[in-house]
Amino acid sequence: MTFTVKRLDHVQLAAPRDTEDEARHFFGEILGLPELEKPEDLKKRGGVWFELGDHQLHIGVEEPFSPAEKAHPALEVANLEGLMARFDEYNVEYKQDDKLPGANRIYTQDPFGNRLEILEWV
């Protein structure tokens, strides 16, 4: 081979048009992800980007919009119980799951119905 896949750069989730404030509330305020400045040429497309460790999470506008109900990113956290308490505080629904050996995990949805897996390796 003459090339190497180096790493995952970003994950993109779809959202309806004009929902950037909802994305900022969920991903920025509730999950605490820092917002990234989008390149000037891409701002007109809508959406919002967030820093996710060494990677990025892009929320992009898709029309017509349909949430990802099976495909999903998995976010690793420290202190899953603390995140669940925060979700309770903000009335974010989640479901606990014990089917992955060595991990505590939950499933939730972003404000647009996209599935999110959140886990903590133990």
Image (cartoon, rainbow, N blue to C red):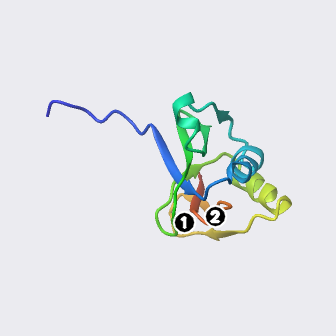
Alpha carbons under labels 1 and 2: distance apart: 9 Å
Tell us which disc is closer to us: 1 or 2: 1
- Labels 1 & 2 near each other (Cβ < 8 A): yes
On-image quarter of the N terminus: top left
Of mark 1 and mark 2, the one earlier in the sequence is 1
Q: Position of residue 21 (x, y in %)?
A: 74, 49
Which residue bears the numbered disc 2?
109
Which residue bears the numbered disc 1?
67
Q: Position of residue 120 (x, y in %)?
A: 61, 52
What secondary structure is found at the residue carrying circle 1?
Answer: loop
Q: Where residue 21 is drawn, which disc sits there?
A: none
110 and 79: which is toward the camera: 110
Q: Is residue 26 left or right of residue 68?
A: right
122 and 43: which is toward the camera: 43
Q: Position of residue 38 (x, y in %)?
A: 58, 33
Q: Position of residue 3 (x, y in %)?
A: 21, 31
Q: Residue at x 64, y 64 (%)?
A: 109
Task: Give the crowd class for mark 2: few <14, some 14-19, many >=20 residues within 10 Å.
Answer: some
